[in-house]
Amino acid sequence: MEINEYLIKCFQLMRNMENIDFFAGVHELSRTEFRLLREVILEEEKGKSIISSELARRLGITRSAVSQIVTKMEKDGVVNRVASPTDRKIAYIRLSENARAVFEEQCKEANATMERIVAEVGEEKVKDFFALYEELRKAMNKVIDQIDAEKKAAK
């Protein structure tokens, strides 16, 4: 296989993996809404709150996109915006009463989907895939870091 074919296959794999819908049949939340809710839950479990700009950074999307998603989720009764007591410009994103139940239901669906995938392929193959994927990811990061260092040194 030619080098450029490896690169194309790599990009295709990443795109295909990202497009897998583990929530088949249960679409109360979109994937991005699910990820956003997960971040809010993680912060609340630490006893902290999170703001839109931090959510945008973690999710790799714009603050405007986060604002639109939060507005929709607020209308759906999943999250609430709570004004900061010290800074009027800041609003924290907090869970609503039913948010955790919605999240747990979608987690249950995703786990059931993954269980069927593992049964279809076999646990050993899945473990081997993840081990190989992790090895490739580490190698990619190492090489990219080396290239970045070489470019900085050349300047």
Image (tube, rainbow, N blue to C red):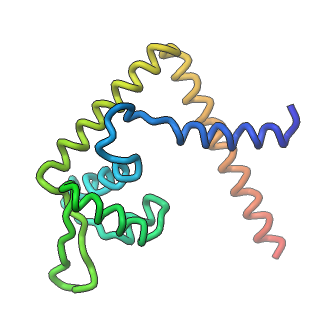
From the top left corner, tell me how far across and down residue 34 is, in percent: 34, 48
Q: Residue at x 37, y 35 (%)?
A: 23
* Left or right placement of residue 10 versus residue 155 in this view: left
From the top left corner, tell me how far across and down residue 119 is, in percent: 44, 14
* Left or right placement of residue 24 versus residue 142 in this view: left
Q: Residue at x 18, y 71 (%)?
A: 82
The C terminus lies in which quarter of the figure? Answer: bottom right
Locate residue 135: give its quadrant: top right
Extreme residue toward the right, this view: 2
From the top left corner, tell me how far across and down residue 24 is, in percent: 39, 32
Report the front residue among 150 and 84: 84
Report the front residue among 41 and 35: 35
Q: Is residue 94 above or below residue 92?
A: above
Q: Residue at x 57, y 22 (%)?
A: 128
Extreme residue toward the left, this view: 97
From the top left corner, tell me how far across and down residue 150 is, in percent: 79, 64
Q: Residue at x 19, y 50 (%)?
A: 99
Q: Is residue 46 above or below residue 15?
A: below
Report the front residue among 24 and 83: 24
Q: Is residue 153 above or below residue 113?
A: below
* Left or right placement of residue 154 versus residue 109 in this view: right
